[in-house]
Image (cartoon, rainbow, N blue to C red):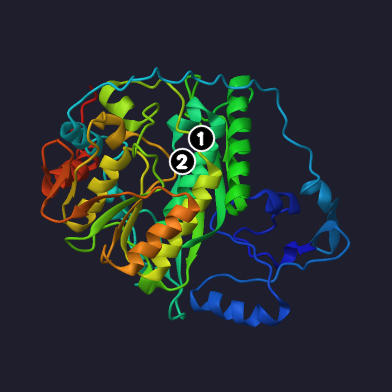
Amino acid sequence: ELDLDKVPVREERMSAYEMMLSESQERMLMVLRPEKEKQAEAIFHKWGLDFAIVGKTTDDLRFRVLHQGDEVANLPIKDLGDQAPEYDRPWTEPKKPAPLAAGDAPQADVAEALLKLLGGPDLSSRRWVWEQYDTLIQGNSLQLPGGDAGVVRVEGHPTKALAFSSDVTPRYCEADPYEGGKQAVAECWRNLTATGALPLAATDNLNFGNPERREIMGQLVGAVKGIGDACRALGFPIVSGNVSLYNETNGQGILPTPTIGGVGLIADWSRMARIGFAAEGQMILLVGAPSMWGTHLAQSAYMRDIHGRTDGPPPPVDLDHEKRVGDHVRALIASGVVTSAHDVSDGGIAVALAEMAMASGIGATVPGLVGTDPIPVWFGEDQGRYLLTLSIDPQSKEWDAIREEQSKLGIFAPWIGSTGGSDVKLGEARAIPVGELTAAYESWFPRFMANEVVDP
């Protein structure tokens, strides 16, 4: 039951209709236990914010709106919620792209390709943006932007912290909305896991073109199905969200962009993992990869940005694999042996290693696989993979126990290299100084904002 006479307003003589439809920003509704009302009010007043008790919950499944002594609305609550009419427009099933032919892996110099990817619009640093905002959150920020997730300490608690991430890969969603929807959820879940956080809940932000076009409505249907399947499999419920449709320019819709934001809980932030290498001489583990480390090039950043190709399906998401590998990674982080962690996503292993090196200033040497095409190894975007560094003696019983656990879980986790030096050396490619990687990574956005970037 809502009493509009108690709602703070800026204008006088507003009608009930105007008040209920107003889209004034920065307002929140919460349900409080009666004994907590004074405590909540004190918090709001401390920060100079309006606070008002504007209604109460009832047990009759009706939504009543009161205004100036009159009942201006009385609606069945179920018909507004879980029994509301479905938005079910006509739609067509998106056509699935054919897989790439066997051996279709166009070649490029590995080092130069990596530098081009890092210095392009998709994978370059967003520092120019986030440095213009408050990233310290009253001094409680434990991890700033640039890693897998932001981490903020829970004020007043000695050990707890919250991790936040937001993810989607529109080119995957365009190629296969169902797999793209699954991947958006899985990557958000993976990014939280990479800090050591237990993913708790998600929100969705569904951005699409004109749903009156059957193919666009088909994208929305497929993405929502994928999101739902992934959330159920990963125990990562959607608790809120919004939808933005009709996003078009001159009749051309945007790429389907079902963004997933997620929050996770770190029980002890002193054991959380960061993206940057922690020290020299530590082993690098690739957890959750196939035997060839990387295989899937279709819809990859490498194929699009280096070769201008957008054909083929996105990488499939095995949700059972995601859950099994992620839970294992989180357990390793909680045990204290992990010194850095990063999920492998856009740009594959090459970009992930470069990001870890740039975050720390420490290089890495990864010999690669002998007798194997290096392109899918370094730039394939197979899902469900993490890079970890460990502070552990490879001759110890602790290391043997980790390997035994991975074997039981059916998780392939090869020791692929080690940290150290000031270069990133990938297989037979030339060693790239970390400073050269950073210069490429940090330069694109400032040059773009200064109108110094010219489209090819």
Q: Do the residues labelled 1 and 2 touch (CB within 8 Å)?
A: yes
Q: Identify the residue at horizontal 55%, vertical 54% (top origin).
A: 25
Is 52 positioned to the left or the right of 131 in the image?
Answer: right
Tag 1 secondary structure: helix
Amino acid type of the residue that numbered disc 1 sits on in the rendered structure: Gly
Front one among 24 and 226:
226
**Percent x, y of residue 268:** 43, 73
The quadrant of the rendering that contains the N terminus is: bottom right
Residue 168's tag is 2
Image quadrant assignment for residue 45: bottom right
Front one among 447 and 420:
420
Is 253 positioned to the left or the right of 62 in the image?
Answer: left
Crowd tier of the residue under label 1, counting other residues whose Cα lies within 10 Å: few below 14, some 14–19, many 20 or above: many
Separation (CA) of disc 1 from disc 2: 8 Å
**Percent x, y of residue 66:** 81, 61
Mark found first going from the N terminus, 1 or 2: 2
The quadrant of the rendering that contains the C terminus is: top left
Examine the rendered structure and indicate whether residue 329 appears above or below residue 254: below
- How many marks overall? 2
**Percent x, y of residue 285:** 31, 53
Query: What residue is disc 1 on?
Result: 180
Q: Can residue 211 be seen in this view?
A: yes
Q: Can residue 138 be seen in this view?
A: no
Amino acid type of the residue that numbered disc 2 sits on in the rendered structure: Val
Q: Which residue lies furthest to the right in this view?
A: 60
**Percent x, y of residue 398:** 35, 68
Crowd tier of the residue under label 2, counting other residues whose Cα lies within 10 Å: few below 14, some 14–19, many 20 or above: many
